Image: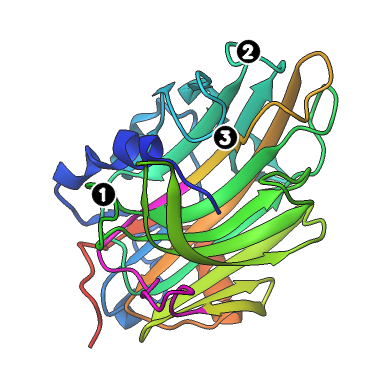
């Protein structure tokens, strides 16, 4: 719902210089369902990696953040080591962790993202596990568990800035509100004279602990957000009439971070978010049920990763 310049600059300005490439990694040569139907390529990833330093992980276009900067707690570290790939119910998943002892020096965040700006019109889908309570330590921290796309902010009020927050889940509240899952579409933002931005946002104020299918259709000027097959929002403009539909290609991102340390009480608390798979169909409007089914077809066919997205232009 609220963003800061450090995130876009630290993660994506470097990505803008990366040349897009077409990658296909499959367990079987004959296990490539639904690829011929894609009008602008497809990305599917089942996150079958050993670690974030696995060459297959970087070879599939993924990068982790390993620095200090916004968003979140000032001075907190973003650590590659906070990303892992445990086995859950017999399947490898991507896991992002965030920890805090209530101090800046004792707070760590995590992020993994596609390092190429090549995702635009089409359908985005992912199966994500949100958590309400920490894996260890005291509860109550203002943690943010996310799945989103973003492009760099080149300068304050950049009219080409694009960001779609498919889910920003705040189990313990934050930003002055209670428990909520936000879907937010952005026009732009600025840092001076004070930070603010232009966007439209929709929230569901209830618990989303557990696994959820998150699907977003980006087509024809509309951004339609679905949670578990239910339409939660249809965004076109912000309150000032500015388009919140993307204006430039973006990267795909997942991260987990603390908004502040105001909710911390004692000791060290560790929270996790898990991602079972991610899917993108360029320039296609795919129903939530079909998007989930396509991901399932790859998995049952033995395909753990497919990437034929070479850079998607707006559909006519």
Q: Quadrant of the N terminus?
A: bottom right
Reply yes or no: does residue 247 show up in magenta. Answer: yes
Q: Is residue 283 left or right of residue 108?
A: left
Asked which secondary structure carries label 2, the reply is loop
- Mark 1 / mark 3, whichever is N-terminal: 3
Q: Which residues are magenta?
A: 235-253
- Mark 2 / mark 1, whichever is N-terminal: 2
Q: What residue sits right under mark 2 in the picture?
A: 106
Closest to the observer, 159 or 233: 159
* Disc number lying in front (2 or 1): 2
The CA span between labels 3 and 2 is 23 Å
What residue is at 23 percent from the left and 47 percent from the top? 155
- Spot occupied by residue 272 in the image (x, y as percentages of width and height): 68, 35
Asked which secondary structure carries label 3, the reply is loop
* Disc number lying in front (3 or 2): 2
Closest to the observer, 305 or 53: 53
- Spot occupied by residue 191 in the image (x, y as percentages of width and height): 37, 42
250 w.r.t. 132: above or below? below
Q: What residue sits right under mark 3 in the picture?
A: 85
The CA span between labels 1 and 3 is 22 Å
Closest to the observer, 278 or 70: 70
Can residue 293 be seen by looking at this rendering? yes
Q: Which mark is residue 116?
A: 1
Can residue 125 be seen by looking at this rendering? no
The CA span between labels 2 and 1 is 31 Å
């Amino acid at each position: 719902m609220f963003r800061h310049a450090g995130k876009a600059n630290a993660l994506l300005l470097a990505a803008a210089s990366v040349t897009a490439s077409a990658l296909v990694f499959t367990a079987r040569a004959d296990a490539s369902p639904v690829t011929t139907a894609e009008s602008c390529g497809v990305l599917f990833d089942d996150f079958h990696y050993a670690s974030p330093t696995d060459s297959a992980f970087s070879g599939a276009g993924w990068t982790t953040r390993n620095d200090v900067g916004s968003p979140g707690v000032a001075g907190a570290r973003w650590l590659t080591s906070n990303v892992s790939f445990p086995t859950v119910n017999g399947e490898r998943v991507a896991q992002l962790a965030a920890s805090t002892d209530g101090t800046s020096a004792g707070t760590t965040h995590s992020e993994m993202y596609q390092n190429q700006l090549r995702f635009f019109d089409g359908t985005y889908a992912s199966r994500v596990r949100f958590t309400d309570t920490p894996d260890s330590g005291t509860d109550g921290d203002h943690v943010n568990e996310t799945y989103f796309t973003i492009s760099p902010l080149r300068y304050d009020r950049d009219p080409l800035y694009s960001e779609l927050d498919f889910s920003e889940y705040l189990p313990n509240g934050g930003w002055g509100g209670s428990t909520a899952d936000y879907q937010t579409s952005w026009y732009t933002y600025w840092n001076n004279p004070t930070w603010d931005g232009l966007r439209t946002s929709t929230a569901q104020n209830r618990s989303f602990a557990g696994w959820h299918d998150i699907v977003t259709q980006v087509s024809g000027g509309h951004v339609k957000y679905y949670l578990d097959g239910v339409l939660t929002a249809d965004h076109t403009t912000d309150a000032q009439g500015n388009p919140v539909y993307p204006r430039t290609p973006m990267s795909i991102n997942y991260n987990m971070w603390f908004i502040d340390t105001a909710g911390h009480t004692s000791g060290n608390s560790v929270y996790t978010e898990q991602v079972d798979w991610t899917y993108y169909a360029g320039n296609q409007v795919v129903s939530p049920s079909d998007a989930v089914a396509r991901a399932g077809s790859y998995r049952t066919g033995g395909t753990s990763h497919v990437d034929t997205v070479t850079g998607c232009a707006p559909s006519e």
